[in-house]
Image: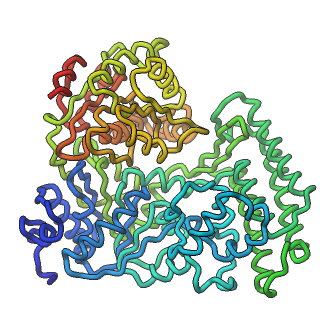
Amino acid sequence: MSHSTGIDEIFATGGALARELPGFEPRPGQLEMARAVEDGFERGSHVLVEAGTGVGKSFAYLVPALRSGKRVVLSTSTIALQQQLFRKDIPMVARALGIEPRVVLLKGRANYLCREKWESARSDLALVERPEMAKLRDWANETTTGDRSDVPFRLDPLLWERFDADGDDCIGESCAHFEDCFYYRRRRDADAADIIVVNHSIFFIDTFVGGLLPAYDHAILDEAHTCEDIAMNVLTVSLSRRSIERTFRRLRRYFNLPTTLTTEVEHRYRDLSDRLGESGAELLRLDERPEIAADLDRLRDALYHLENWISDNGTSALKRPPRGDLERDLRIAGAVKSLATQAEVVDRLLAADDDAIRWAQLFPQGSELHCTPFDAAPILRELLFSRTPCVLTSATLALDGDFTYMRARLGIDQAEELVADSPFDYREQARFFVAPADLEPDDEDFVRRAYGYVEEALSYSRGRAFLLCTSFRRANEFGERLRASGLHPVEVQRPRGGLDRDGLLRWFTSTPGAVLVGTRTFWEGIDMPGERLSCVIIDRIPFAQPDHPVLDARVKALRESGEDPFVRLQIPAATMLLKQGFGRLIRTRSDRGAVLVLDGRLQGKRYGKRMIAALPPATRIAHLDELREFFQS
């Protein structure tokens, strides 16, 4: 197709997309978004688009991206959207435009099978005798991608770790399988690609550290409401029992380690955890616990002792002879680096740095210590938004049409902005109920009173509901009452044990009248069209945990600068997440359903009115019995 073909023609009735996609209908918001994205590509400017559910945002950015002739990195936060873009949407748009772009889906190293590890495992009898190994062997012999997501059965994460292409174990070009390595083959494909599809973690690691992606002209960040959180996760360094055990598991694959030194590290970590546990708090700022500095010093010394031992004794400690001096040196260097990385985390936890927040979270199995930047915005401004034109889009980026909050959180000074409204008729398709103003989630009898609304709503919707909670404790309380009633099939998300997110979604999809009680992971990124999800119940306004050290540090800084942190930070963040939770309900033009918020502050407090104004314009109802006729019709 000639580039002279206008964007309007492509999206028109009888246009290129309609010819390729049966049932395609022009949508004003989609065309408006496509025009804005194409203008951004031509001008080299940032574009922020809040695209309401049903706008069809992927086509609206793919058409300009594929027409641009530029190399574009397309980043998402969920595997589901990555796969949809790579396997379905991009090929469809390319066919409509009559072009054949080179497209690569690139994932993190740990998603790919390492051929060298797989071959060396043949001699490990403990592995060979595991029952799932036969199935994994069949897959490994046939796979052309080496991609874990293509494994057709559920796999123990620790078993996959034994074979993944993680960088700690990689010897790069010295490996006998470098040329046919699944991961490096994808990297080479990316070097020649027009469109590179990645997730936000890889995108931000490349932004901050480099070395993962080739140079590119533009970036498109879909599901952009998650960008700040994922960027902060990438910038955060952490120390935990799990990270130490993982390091030792990887080292023991290649080296015979001295028990005295590994035990010293484990004991020093345990001493540190015990000291932190003396506070009795689940969350705490490390700068308020100066007495742990000595424990951190001793842990760092223990890591140095093991690091120095491997430097001095690595050759004789190798479990199998290396193929040559280069492999030997790389194995030893990799082991030293993995221990040095842990020691560097301890250094960061000890440093006095006003731009970082050092904090700990305590669990029964030990503590996790973190060093988090105070704010991702200045780093993103310098390393991304001052260098590369970006399109950011999501169903939730603006607050009542205003992008100020999101631009401030991400460090975007100037951008073209657009709100592309959903084509759905929310007033007709959805009902919205807010609990009375006197029902507040911190009241002692909240669950008992709120459960009455839950049970009544579910009687009209015949189950078919998500109950979205802000904590596992609250989810369990509601779950127990629902199970005791025996009126609906119920599953509750748990922090450990039980079904994982995908398992819970499969259960919900296949169980008539199901009620799924979930926490944060079910508030966003779930696409459940049709009648099986007809009711979304939200237990409370999703304000961030007030005693969380990162939020606490930001709140104090805003107060010191004379600003109101509740207005500047906490209300906007909670409103964004509330919009996400609400957005689980209406996914197509034919969907119908009800949203309930059990937190009376939404109508009793002044800020609640602003939050409601930011939500989709569903028909408000004052009494739940209005749902009887709605669902019957």
Q: How many marks?
A: 0
- In the rendered view, tell whether residue 329 sits above or below residue 459: below
Side (left or right) of 244 relative to 459: right
Side (left or right) of 175 relative to 106: right
- In the rendered view, tell whether residue 245 sits above or below residue 105: above
Viewer-proximal residue among 371 and 534: 534
Q: Tell me where residue 474 appears, x and y as whole percent.
A: 50, 26
Viewer-proximal residue among 42 and 51: 51
Residue at the spot 17% in from the left edge and 59% down from the top edge: 30
Whether residue 340 can be seen here? no
Which of the image's four quarters has the N terminus? bottom left
Q: Tell me where residue 447 appears, x and y as whole percent.
A: 45, 17
Q: Tell me where residue 275 appears, x and y as whole percent.
A: 79, 36
- In the rendered view, tell whether residue 368 sits above or below residue 303: above
Viewer-proximal residue among 191 and 39: 191
Which of the image's four quarters has the C terminus? top left
Q: How is the image coloured?
A: rainbow
Q: Tell me where residue 322 appears, x and y as whole percent.
A: 81, 82
Q: Quadrant of residue 87?
A: bottom left
Residue at the spot 28% in from the left edge and 30% down from the top edge: 595
Q: Quadrant of residue 453?
A: top left
Whether residue 569 can be seen here? yes
